[in-house]
Each structure stands twice: as structure tokens, then as C-alpha cells.
Image (cartoon, rainbow, N blue to C red):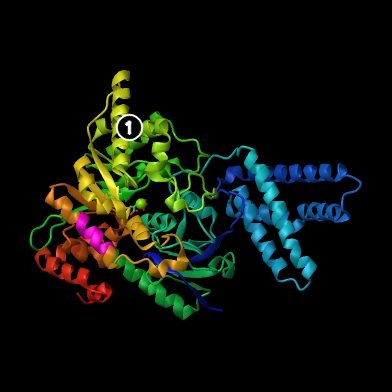
Amino acid sequence: MTFAVHGLAVARGIAIGRAVLVASSRVDVVHYFIEPGQVAAEIVRVRNGRNAVVDELQRLQAEMPHDAPPELAALLDVHLMLLQDEALVSGVKHWITDRLYNAEWALTTQLEIIARQFDEMEDEYLRERKADLEQVVERILRYMKGVASPVAPPPSSPRRKGTQDLLLDDKVDVPLVLVAHDLSPADMLQFKQSVFAGFVTDVGGKTSHTAIVARSMDIPAVVGARAASQLVRQDDWVIIDGDAGVMIVDPSPIILAEYGFRQRQGSLERERLSRLRHTPAVTLDGETVELLANIEQPADAAAAVRAGAVGVGLFRSEFMFMGRNGHLPDEEAQYQAYREAVEGMQGLPVTLRTIDVGADKPLDKGHKDSHLNPALGLRAIRWSLADPAMFRTQLRAVLRAAVHGPVRLLFPMLAHVGEIRQTLAQVDMARAELQARGAAFGPVQLGAMIEIPAAALIVRSFLKYFDFLSIGTNDLIQYTLAIDRADEAVAHLYDPLHPAVLGLVADVISEGQAQGKSVCVCGETAGDVAMTRLLLGLGLRSFSMHPAQILAVKQEVLRADTRKLAAWAQEVMASEDPAALLSAG
Ligand code: PEP
Ligand code: MG
């Protein structure tokens, strides 16, 4: 039966395909596709994990003191029985062999399926055994986590071969749509080059980092869809409408035909926009506008160039540091990565932002920040300044990469002048260290993110120290309005048009202009075509966004007349209902 699940529209377009469920687990689980040659090794890994847990439980049973409560022994029996359960064993084998899921993914997928069967049981005692099953699987996962995987991480090249292996139908290349309770940014990166045609997650806000990575992949996505992962079953046919933020499950033929039509319209529109690639972004009244790309990995530089970006306005370097069990890449590895990005941009500038971990970007996926309020905690520049040696490793790598092309160095989450001074002192020290070593390094422009209201309010001090500024509207909105950007429960209050937000953005732009320094917006509003005219009207001439958005924003720029927009933008700012004016304007 057809039904729809509503969430937040985060990445545009229509995807139609079969659902692949990624079950949530309390244990940090990696998800990736294996090569067919690795199937046997993955099955052995699960078997070893299961055998180790059986041994452990049997040892516990043997060592049980005589006065232990009898329930404990019975519980161990139940766990041992569940471990031998054929449905668990054969199901896991199926996901590994037929779908090429890695062992951990196969285990959690099968757990989800059996857990749902338990949920449907009449008998309360049996229903409650679900928790036991979860514990047993978690034991296996923990054991497997302790044992290094013999399987290499997924290749970063597009896995067309994997797609063929995953065909659900022999003749038709059926697209796959990922449905999960939550996906960490690191998970998303792993899936970045993979086969999925779209994403849906239960949790997340429009500017959560999972949503941001989905957008950078340029595939339709919906987040904050509440119970989506509970309502959909493996292999269900689903439609993702990334424009409306809706997932339609088990669509009827008529609905399928309608969305198929809209999908084709979308590709025609993209094709039409692609003709603007080489057109300079100049407004009707002759103002040149800089359209830059946001990237997460060095390899993304190619997409940025393809999309006609005139540089990288934001390289979120933290994505390179994720999912490495807390071991950061050394200076040489970082240098090679930054150099790849710089060379990939073929002489166009690259803005490298220093590591911005914390809040919804933990270093290790699955690791939950135990602090009371991680978004206000030791994150971004605070984290870097707390470990100066680690920070300087990154700075030295960036300075060395600057030998290969123009580099701008950008610092996230600065609020205090004291932090600015400390940061700049670290840059000086990094230079001195390279000099002492006789290593070559290049010139860099220095810039600050303006993403904390305090920074926007003392923007003059920032301009004294920095060559350029970049407004991070994602965080600026979060902190100005006290709305967690990743929390779907308050997503309706996350408002880029709030007069307080617009006021801060406008002031930073005009102060920058007054002092002849470049100001960019690199938050998600820069790539939102509904905001382009307003930002132009506020004087913005530099926008940084996902490569996939550049051409649509360029189209808005080409149609704009900034002389008219300036007066209109003031009206929008002064209005109590800016959204109404924006849609009317
Ligand atoms: C921002 O806050 O707007 C920004 C660009 O940085 P991030 O989304 O990585 O926090
Ligand atoms: Mg930010």
C-alpha cells in the first residue's frame, strides 16, 4: 500500500529505487560494499566473532558462582541459543554474499529484520527477547571491532561493478536508495562515491553535516523523516522527492509514472543549466560575482572545476580526519592531500579551513560527545588551540601546499581577539618551524569565519587582523537563534531570514566593503537560489556553495540588477515578515 513519509527537503531532485536499510546500532558500525572476492573472508570474520562470543558466554557459565541468581544462568542460555539461531546466521550470509555488505552491516541489517519479527510477537516474554538479541549482536560487533578488519576500506572510485553485483533484477539496473535512522558525516563520505541514488534519514536538520554531504553528492535527500527507517522494509520501492522533502513508499503505477516524468524534467533542466558553465557570473548592471565551491575532499576539486567554480571558498578539512580512530594524518599525508586539492584547482584559489570538529562532526563516527552541550564546547578553533602541536602540524602542511598554487587559510569559530592572536602566533610558529627545517612554503592569505554572533558584532577587530572573512551562516543562524541546526524537532524555527540574522550578515558585508576586504558567505544560504537576490542586494559579491548549486545560482546572478536589489534588500531587512517580501520580490 502506498504511503508517504514527510521530512525536510535538503538535496533537490527525484530518486526512484529500492530501499537499502542501514540499521542503527549502539556500536560504532562501518558500512561499505566489499568486493566479490572478499565474501568468504567476511563470512569467516562473522563466524569468528560469533564463536568468540559463544566461548565467552560458556566461560561465564562455567565460572558462575553457586549462589548466583538462577535467572542469570537462564539468561546466558538464552543468549547462547540466540547465537546459534539459524535465521541470524543464514541472514547474515545472505547480505554478505548476495548484496556484498561488509560483515558489520550484514549483522545489523539482519538484527533489524529479526528484531521486527520479535516486535510483532503476541507473547510478551518472547517480545522481550529482542533486547537479548540486540545484546548478543552487540557483543559480536564489539568483538569484531577489536579485531582488525582484513578488508580494506571501500575504494573511492565509483563502484559500477558493485552496482552490477547488486542488481535486484537481472536486466534492469535498479537504483538503490539508502534509508537510515541516522548517518554520520563519516558514513556519508564512505557512501559518497557509491551506488546510491538518494538518501533518507530519520533525524537531522537542513544544515546538519549529514545533509550538507548529501547535497555535495548532488543526489536527492530527505532528513528529519522521523520514523522512516521503521516504516520502510528492505527492498521496498520508494520515491524520494528531494524538493518537497517527502518519501513515498510502495508507489502505485500512476504515482511512479508522474515522478518518472518529473525526474526527466529535472535532468532536462540540469542540461539546460550546464550551458552556463563558461558564462562569467556578471549581473545585468555589470557587477562581477565570485562563485566558489565548498568541498570536503581533495578529489572534489574536479567537480568544482567542472561546475565552473572560480576557486574553492571552503575546504572542510575535518572530513579528512574522520573515521580514523582518533589518529590524525601526519604532516606529510595532509600536505599531499592539500597539494592534490590545490593542483586540482589548476591555479584557482583554494580556501583551506583548519579542522572544525565537534558537535555534529565527531572525529569518530558513533562517538557521542559526552559534554553537556557539544555545540558550545571544545570544537573547531578551540579544539585546535587546545592542542597546539596538532594544530601546527596542519598549519605546516597547508603552508607547504601553498607552494603549488594560491591558498587562503581560514579559521573556524573564532570569537575573541585573544583567540585571534593565539591563532596567528601559531601560524608564525609553524612558518618558523618550516624555515628551521629548510622546508619550502608559500604565501597564504589569512581569513576568519564569522559564525558566532559575537564575532559579527566585533567585526572591525576581525578586519584588523585578517585579509578576508567568510560568513558561516549555518552556525551563525544556530547561535543567533539558539536553534540546534541538527535537531529536526526545532527545524521549523531555523530561519535564515530572521531580521537578527540578516542584520548581522549585512553589517559584516558592509564593514568588509568599507575596509576593502573580501567577504564571502560559505554557509548553505549561499547555495540557496531563493536567497541569491537578497544577498546580492546586501552587497555580497562572493558566494561559496556545493558545486552542484553553482549553475543555478549563476542563473540568478545573470538575471539580477544589483542597483534595484539594494533598496529592496533594505525593505526586506526592515520587514517583520521578510519571507513574504522575498517570495513577492
Ligand atoms: C557554517 O557554519 O556556515 C559553515 C560553513 O561551516 P560548517 O557548516 O562546516 O559548520
Ligand atoms: Mg560552521
Q: Is residue 350 magenta?
A: no
In the picture provided, is 444 more to the left or to the right than 39?
left
Instruction: Determine the residue located farthest toward the right in the rendered image.
Output: 66
Q: In what element is the residue under mark 1?
A: helix
Is residue 174 at least partly visible in the picture?
Answer: no
Q: Quadrant of residue 336?
A: top left
The image quadrant where one finds the C terminus is bottom left
In the picture provided, is 114 more to the left or to the right than 285?
right
From the top left corner, tell me how far across and down residue 450 is, in percent.
28, 51
Residue, disc 1 = 426
Up-down relation of residue 494 to residue 161 (above or below):
below
- Magenta stretch mostly in which secondary structure? helix
Foreground pick, 337 / 441: 441
Foreground pick, 9 / 443: 443
In the picture provided, is 567 more to the left or to the right than 86?
left
Q: Residue at x 74, y 57 (%)?
A: 132
Residue type (three-letter) at the residue carrying disc 1: Gln
Q: Residue at x 66, y 45 (%)?
A: 142
Is residue 567 at least partly visible in the picture?
Answer: yes
What residue range appears in magenta?
A: 501-508
